[in-house]
Each structure stands twice: as structure tokens, then as C-alpha cells.
Image (cartoon, rainbow, N blue to C red):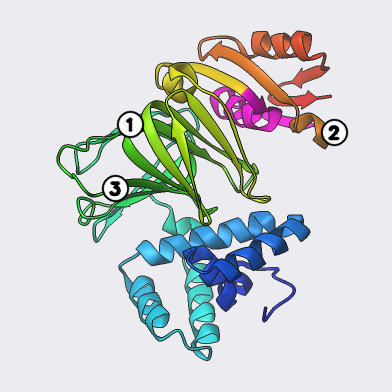
Amino acid sequence: MQSTEFTEIAHFLAEPSFLQYCDGKDAEATKLWQDWLITHPEKQALATQARQVYWTLVLQEGEIGSYYSRFRKTNRQQHYGAWVWRVAAILIAIGGIAFFFRNTETQGVKTVKTGNDEIIKVLLPDSSEMFVNGATEVHFDTLAFRESRTIYLIKGEIFCQVNNGASKGVPFIVETPSGLKVEDISTSFSVKSNSDILTEETVQVQEGLVHLHVDKDVIQVRENELVRFDHITRAISKGRADQMSASGWIKGEYAFYDATMAELAKTLENLYKINIRFKESATSKLRISIFFIKSQEIGQILENIEDVYNLNITKNGSEVIFE
């Protein structure tokens, strides 16, 4: 590695092995960065942001995107510094990385972004349906979608009902910033990723089968199965899923099976406009199974969690503390 500090996004993007890690095609670079992130947990959020910028640069077709494409083709060491600082200068001039994540369509690249408690339905170019949960960002290329049916889930949760009739032979794929790739095998499924704040990503299959690509491994996930993927340790575990947990949120019904308190907290924060803090980090890692509907009062939900899991929860306005 050229830099050992990595205190800015530009430092990651200036590192050749990090770009190879983002591409996901170099096993040596992938292993290098997986090990580095495990030993530098304080850098995980910044590294995730750098991967998000990388993804967006790949998708952009404007000045930044074309410059980046030429850079990737040459792949010469001397170009790294010039490219990174050019990108950094543009980022600063336009007000940071938020510039890239807008509800726009530029040169066929469609960006969908939802508010915290907003759920929308998107009809994809191949007639597949994608339901987008609150606080979610996705990208896809509308012009090339029939030839390369790939959804880039930057953060949040989506549920896909895939239509394979019009695009036979072209896989339907959802990718996340951690390198997780979900390939549909005639099915309906959900993918959740908040890798900037949570270590676990989840895939739930409501009908049919998906292939989960993690590094060099391919895992089959069948109907009513859930897979949890820790993007730091790369560990995988399976659990139960059903229609309620995979897509119930579309109708305002939420089911969590053996989820972490942190995952539940993220959903409650989005739905009820509250801020949840854990007095002890161990509490955020506790596993919980719970069902609630959006119309329920937050006080009732918190009371149920207190009683069942023997926690002390205090609420002062929009601030909630789990002890």
C-alpha cells in the first residue's frame, strides 16, 4: 500500500490495490483489504464511502466518468495521483460526494433515492418490479439494462419481483458496495445493505432461488431462507425468512428474525423520526425477533422490547437510549 494513513476518501482512491478490491476481480487485493479492514475497524465507514464514490464514478458518463474510464484503461501508476486529485478537486467544488447521489437520470444512468419513511415501486426496463424501501439509494443503467440487468444497491433495502420472460439468458443481479452479488434464478427476493453503519447485509428469498456470490464462493439461497453476510469478516450464516420478513414492509408490516438490535434500531429511526443510542455496544449486537406494524405507537414497540429482552429503554423527545 502506498499510504498507511487513509484519512480521506482520496487516499483510498489513490491506492491501486483498493481499486482492484472495488472491482472484485483480484483475489489477492480482495484478501489484502479484507484483512486490513478487520485490523482497522475505525476506517471501515470511510472505506465504504470510498467504494460508493468508486461505483458512482464507474457509472457516470460525464466529464468525471470519461476521464476515469481512460484512466482505468491505461492503468499506469503515474496517473493515479493526477486522477485522484482531479476527482477530489471536483468533489470539493461541487460540495462533496452527495453530488453523485441525486434522483436523476444522466446518460441512461438512473438514480433512485427515497426519504426515510418513503416506499416507492419502480418498473424496470425488462418489466421486472423493484420496491424501494425508505432511506435507500439504487443505480441502474436504463439504456443497457436489457443486456446487463444489474442493480447497484448503494444503501438501504429493495424487493425485486423478476420478470425473466423478456430477457432470457441475461442474469438479473443486485450488487452492494461490500462486493456482495445476488444473482436471480427465477424468483422474488429482498436485499438489505447499510454497510456504512452496519456490518451485516441480508438476502431473503420469498420465492424460487438465488445464487449469492461472495468472493469466489457461490451459495444457494432457497425459498423462505435468509442469509446474513458480515462484510468485514466475510462470514455467512443462514436463517429463516418468509413473505412477512422479505416484503411485508411494502404494506407497513415489519418482521425481524434473529436480527441485531442495531438493524432494528435503523428501521425504527427511519419510521418514527427518532435517534436511538446504545449505552453499551454489546446491546446493539443482541439478537431480536419481533413483529410490528407501522401504525403502532413507538412507545408500545419500545415497551414490548423492554419486557421481552429485559432492557431499560428511556425516551426523551426524539432521543431514545437502550441500556
Q: Check the image and report above or below for 228 versus 301.
A: below
Residue 142, percent from left and from top: 23, 51
Residue at 67%, 11% (x, y): give it: 299
N-term-proximal mark, 2 vs 1:
1
* Residue at the extreme left of the image, as rendered: 166
Amino acid carrying label 1: it is Thr
Q: Quadrant of the C terminus?
A: top right
Secondary structure of the residue carrying numbered label 1: strand
Please give the residue where the numbered disc 1 appears in the rendered image: 187
Amino acid carrying label 3: it is Pro
Amino acid carrying label 2: it is Glu
N-term-proximal mark, 3 vs 2:
3
Q: Is residue 43 magenta?
A: no
User: Label 2 vs label 1: CA separation?
Assistant: 40 Å
User: Label 3 vs label 2: CA separation?
Assistant: 43 Å
Estimate how packed mark 1 is, as few (under 14), some (14 to 19) or many (20 or more) residues with alpha carbons within 10 Å.
Answer: many
Residue at 67%, 78% (x, y): give it: 1
Q: How many marks?
A: 3
Q: Which mark, by number, is residue 240?
A: none
What is the magenta range?
A: 258-280
Please give the residue where the numbered disc 2 appears in the rendered image: 280
